[in-house]
Amino acid sequence: MAREALSVDIADQLRRDILRGKLAPGAPIKERVLAEEMDVSRTPMREAIRILAKEGLVQLRPARSPIVANPCFREIAESVEVLRALELLSGELACRHASDAEIARIRALHEQIADAYDRVDTLDLFEIDMQFHIAIARASHNRALWETHMGFLARLWRARYLSAKQRRSRDRVLRQHGAIVAALEARDPHRVKVEIEAHLEALLDNIRRYLAGETAEEPPAPEPESEAAAARHAGAAL
Amino acid sequence: MAREALSVDIADQLRRDILRGKLAPGAPIKERVLAEEMDVSRTPMREAIRILAKEGLVQLRPARSPIVANPCFREIAESVEVLRALELLSGELACRHASDAEIARIRALHEQIADAYDRVDTLDLFEIDMQFHIAIARASHNRALWETHMGFLARLWRARYLSAKQRRSRDRVLRQHGAIVAALEARDPHRVKVEIEAHLEALLDNIRRYLAGETAEEPPAPEPESEAAAARHAGAAL
DNA sequence: CCCACGAATTTGGTATACCATTTTTCGTTG
DNA sequence: CAACGAAAAATGGTATACCAAATTCGTGGG
């Protein structure tokens, strides 16, 4: 038994393809062709698609090909709002619970970013950025929190990546990261909160600017999704 | 094509069985026997199990039967901490974005609870309680928020239910609900925040009391789950 | 009597085949 | 030539069969 996994490998691969743009937003995900391309059967491919759907990277449609999610600005902004709440909590808890070693690692990641700044390509840089933010969430020592946080990072990967590509914002990002690290080292929850908020505000600005006038193509959200149907998630239909 | 569904029906059924206690915490979920019991094939049963796993109600183990999640107090407390952040944000946004009709519906649910107070059985009462909290989250008009919020409600269903069963806490719960509704009607974010915080604090107290000395049977968390493996979720291994 | 080793069974993961619905295309007709 | 309709192709959902790993239980040796 392949100890827990072909489907997650496929999911990883798909995720990369989506985030790298090989599968454009809005593109259909045909499980048959993708399964053949990757030389696996439909079953694990199907599971992989579900995994990505839960993460919000692909959108399932009843009796239709799933498509690569293509969130409008409003949807992105809503996710960022939740991400803000999660990161603020992470920061607060990290001040209380993080070990010195964990904070040191966060600083190390920050310096790694500053170091690689204009040596490596944006995507590689962005990977470290991701690790930086994940490390903060993990430093909260709250598993439910960092797992959820990671889910939102994945969901916002593309938007964050597009934001990070805008070179002129890099100085600001670097400064903000530095400020966050310093506040963590001081274990000053209020400063951490302020700095994280500023960082996310800047992210939202970048995204807003990027998406300003372009894709007004998609309908806001044709899906009705009745409250009753949605409520099943919580077992409300018990 | 049964318009997107058998697996979610099964998931609903399983969720009910878990929450109603038919499948006790720690019990193994054998996809073969459950599939036969429900007279479906293993494929959709498998998908259903994954759905519940993502919700945190069942726990997948590599090369082992999944088991019904049996979180220890620490894990519950961590989830409640995240739930607090989500509900605080919900309350704040609801103050700004909720329609009067939505707030009226929240009050109606509150009064329905007060009404049914000691007429109906705890489980039915609890369903309404669930709807009450979901309605607040939905009033935020932030889809990502209320979906995530609903996920945590599901994850905490059992703990919340056990808390709600303690009759002597019901008066307090009712008072707190009333205070939350009043604060929402006044659209006073600060009051909403205070009241929600009190409500969740009480919840945690109840759970703590309930689980006080009993199940110290399970190992804290034998799963190492390397950071690298976990980081895949966020595409960090890109 | 206990421990160790191995075979059988259990169980989850994967592949393949089948079915139902939807979409598309092509032919016919007004 | 356009529009409607039926047939065919495509696609996702479900069922079944097969495989490999892991646990378990029985047996033999110490």
Image (cartoon, coloured by chain):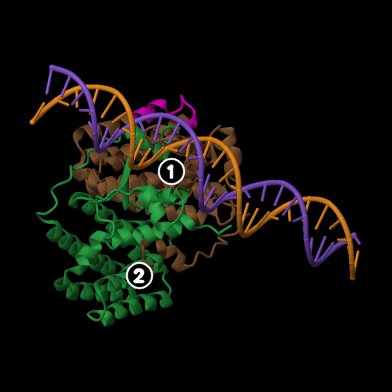
Chain colours: A green, B brown, C purple, D orange
Say which chain tag 1 marks: B
The residue tagged 2 is A131
**Label 2 element class:** helix
The answer to whether residue A111 is above or below residue A225 is below
Q: Is residue A224 left or right of residue B162?
A: left
Residue B116 lies in the magenta-colored region:
yes
- Magenta segment, which residues? B111-123
Residue B156 lies in the magenta-colored region:
no
The answer to whether residue B124 is above or below residue A130 is above
| Residue drawn at (38%, 36%) of the image | B4
Which mark, by number, is residue B154? 1
List x then y, in percent, for residue A155.
Answer: 31, 56
List x then y, in percent, for residue A1.
Answer: 59, 57
| Residue drawn at (35%, 34%) of the image | A229
State the predominant SS element of the stretch in magenta.
helix
The one nearer the camera, A12 or B148, is A12
Label 2 with label 1: CB-CB less than 8 Å: no
Say which chain tag 2 marks: A
**Label 1 element class:** helix
Q: Is residue A40 left or right of residue A61?
A: right
Q: Is residue B94 visible?
A: yes
- Picture quadrant of residue B138: top left
Residue mark closest to the camera, 2 vs 1:
2
User: How packed is label 2: few (under 14 Cα within 10 Å), some, or many (20 or more)?
Assistant: some
The answer to whether residue B175 is above or below residue A80 is above
Distance, label 2 to label 1, CA atoms, is 29 Å
Please state which amino acid type lies under the numbered disc 1: Ala
Please state which amino acid type lies under the numbered disc 2: Gln
Q: In this view, does B160 lie to the left or right of B107?
A: right
